[in-house]
Image (cartoon, helix red, strand yellow):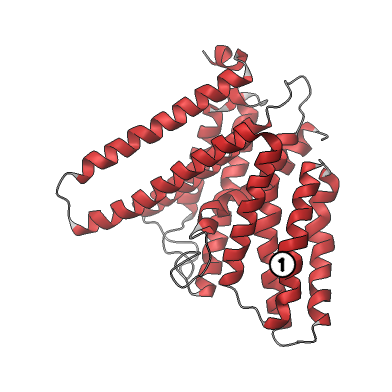
Amino acid sequence: MLKTLRELSSEDQIGLLFIILFGVLLAVTVSALLVTLQDRPSVWIKRYERFKRDLRAVWVGAVVFWLAWISGPVGATLLFGIFSFLALREFITLSPTRRSDHRSLLLAFFVVLPVQYVLVGNQNFDLFSVFIPVYVFLAIPVISALAGDPERFLERNATIQWGIMVCVYGLSHAPALLLLNFPHVEAGRGAFLVFFLVMVAAVAQITQEAFSRWLRHRPLARQISRSFSARAWALGTATGGLAGGLLFWITPFKLPQAIAMALIAGGAGTLGEFVMKALKKDAGVAYWGNQAAVTGAVGLLDRVAPLAFAAPVFFHSVRWYFKLSP
């Protein structure tokens, strides 16, 4: 059966994937609606409201991925560029900055972000890999110093740099997967890698949170999260690896390679979400884009944080292991 699936054309495979994806989402949505018709305690209702918000986000993500597929590499790159812009705005809104940081912020939003995605679109992988962590990280403090405001200088610059790193650098690696060319593999199959990455990161994160609630083991860092434990993280990562193994037929990977790459992506994504929880604790908010925020994308950074960490690790692992060129 798996051999038959791998022999399908790209169009047939992606059609089958979307039928499965939207079919599962429709079944879950209908089941959730039927459950609401029953009398439930107030605690359950609160959990259902949270589940409904998460389900709505999954629906939006599925539709967005479908739009990215039909619009091709250029459309997908533009789409992720918009995500980066909204996520960075959400991050900066809840971060400590001063009026003297406006030049650095203008540089981040209107120079760094578009240049990074242009480098991705032009397949300048060597330059796009170092543009932000080398050139931009050195340029930001220079621009800030020229503003003449030394108060909390290091904190302010580190905040802007970290926002760029997560929201722009991390997310830009997802559309870069569209442009990888594997030897002896049909061209234009990069979208399957994006699908593989998104599904693995999502499955690992969701199952890690579920195991955190069920297992109730000693947390690794109680001040950051009372539910994040080593066992829950390991089980979530393992479940992401299993999901990657089930999806290996859409990738250029063999089964062991797919599992290994999924473990890398799932582990990185769940750890990234844990880091973002620490940042939210520091900012004093329960989630990015809370009611005190004025951004237009409420909670977007909460949704894409695992992907922002998993994408660069997954991209460079794949490119290094298979010795790929653009």
User: Image quarter for residue 142?
Assistant: bottom right
**Is disc 1 placed on a helix, strand or loop?**
helix
13 with respect to 22 (left or right)? right
64 with respect to 40 (left or right)? right
At label 1, counting other C-alpha atoms closer than 10 Å, the crowd grade (few under 14, some 14-19, many 20 or more) is many
Amino acid identity at mark 1: Gln
Name the quarter where the C terminus is drawn.
top right
Name the residue: 29% across, 36% down.
30
- Choose between 281 and 230: the one closer to the eye: 281
- Residue 171 appears in the picture as rendered: yes
- Choose between 212 and 48: the one closer to the eye: 48
- Residue 215 appears in the picture as rendered: no
- In percent of width and height, residue 300 lies at 52, 56
Q: Which residue is mark 1?
A: 161
Q: Which residue appears farthest toward the left when viewing the image? A: 39
143 with respect to 27 (left or right)? right
Above or below — where is 297 with respect to 102? Answer: above
